[in-house]
Amino acid sequence: MAPDPNIQPSTRLMGSDGPVELSGRAIGVSMPCPTCGYDLRGASAIGQCAECGHQVRDVLASAIDPQAHRLPPLADPRAVGDGLVFISLGLAVCVALPLIGMLCVWIATQTDRLLLDSRLVDLAMFIGAVAVLALGLLGCWQLRPRHKGPLQRAARKAIRLAGLGTLLMGAGLLAMPMLDGMVGLVGTLAAWAGMLLSLGGVRGVLVEAGRRCRLFRTATLQRQRIPTLMLTATLAGACLTGVRVARMVDPAAVGSIMWLSVLGLTMTLMLAMGLVYFVINAMWIRRDLRQPPPRLAELLRE
């Protein structure tokens, strides 16, 4: 719906220090119009784009984030953003590897032949375990508390839980190639328990740091909630653990094993999709922490 020309937009805009009067002010920096790309430098703050008529006030409102500037500053915002990305990538790798392994097993079953040498599969799982350990521990190092601040308590909890979870995930991935036996069962439980610990530990950091990212605060469908991930991970882990237990108790019970395998694969795919959004959310937060939005005063001149 086109805006009513009889309704004049307000000449005030809320900045981080309160309402700012835009009358008599102009854009003092290079700022492209989001509609046509025209450079609005020198345009009146209460005027319109010379090319497409887009309201300059709306452009200013979309470029600033007063709420983020009102929050207490983080000791090392870049490290916090990097830590979130590293941990989220480690979790994604931990889920991607079992998915690839299940796909290889399914292909081998359908074709009645082993398409990949078992040593290559073991090597891939070993490399994946090393990647999970490296990403998780590097993320914990980046999140370590520097000084007193709003993330102090959340960072300590994240390091304890995410660090332990990373070690469990790495150990679980190393044991997962053993499809049968108690070692494979323990490996599966360790990997999923480690994922739950890591998600629980990083939750507080994600919420606190996410308050400084407007896209994360306002996102709906693309924002991933940690409790939903934890529930999905629990269901996926329970199903895959049930498959291993069923194989150990009665290998001939093909029906129950197949049913649990399909359900476990479905839940794992849902978890993988959720972790993709988790990585995207972490990248949003990292971008705004590394390059905070400008203050309104920085964009205007008399």
Image (spheres, rainbow, N blue to C red):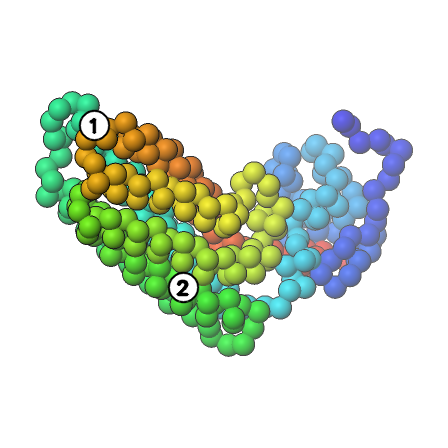
In this image, 253 relative to 84: left or right? left
Gap between marks 1 and 2, in whole Å? 36 Å
| Image coordinates for residue 148, horizontal then vertical, percent | 54, 76
The correct choice, above or below, for 51 with respect to 155 in the image is: above
| Image coordinates for residue 91, horizontal then vertical, percent | 36, 50
Q: Which residue is mark 1?
A: 107
Q: Secondary structure at mark 2?
A: helix
Q: Residue at x 51, y 61 (%)?
A: 205
**Quadrant of the rendered image containing residue 246:** top left
In this image, 158 relative to 249: left or right? right
Q: Secondary structure at mark 1?
A: helix
**Rendered-image quadrant of the C terminus:** bottom right
Q: Residue at x 40, y 58 (%)?
A: 197
In this image, 175 relative to 226: left or right? left
**Disc ID at residue 120:** none
| Image coordinates for residue 187, horizontal then vertical, percent | 25, 52
Of the two numbered discs 1 and 2 on the same chain, state the one appearing first in sequence. Answer: 1
**Disc ID at residue 161:** 2
Residue 255 visible, this orientation: yes
**Rendered-image quadrant of the N terminus:** top right
Q: Residue at x 63, y 39 (%)?
A: 34
In this image, 38 relative to 172: left or right? right
Q: Residues within 10 Å of mark 1 (few under 14, many from 20)?
A: some
Q: Residue at x 11, y 27 (%)?
A: 113
Q: Amino acid at mark 1?
A: Ile
Q: Amino acid at mark 2?
A: Leu
Nearest to the observer: residue 219 or residue 225: 225
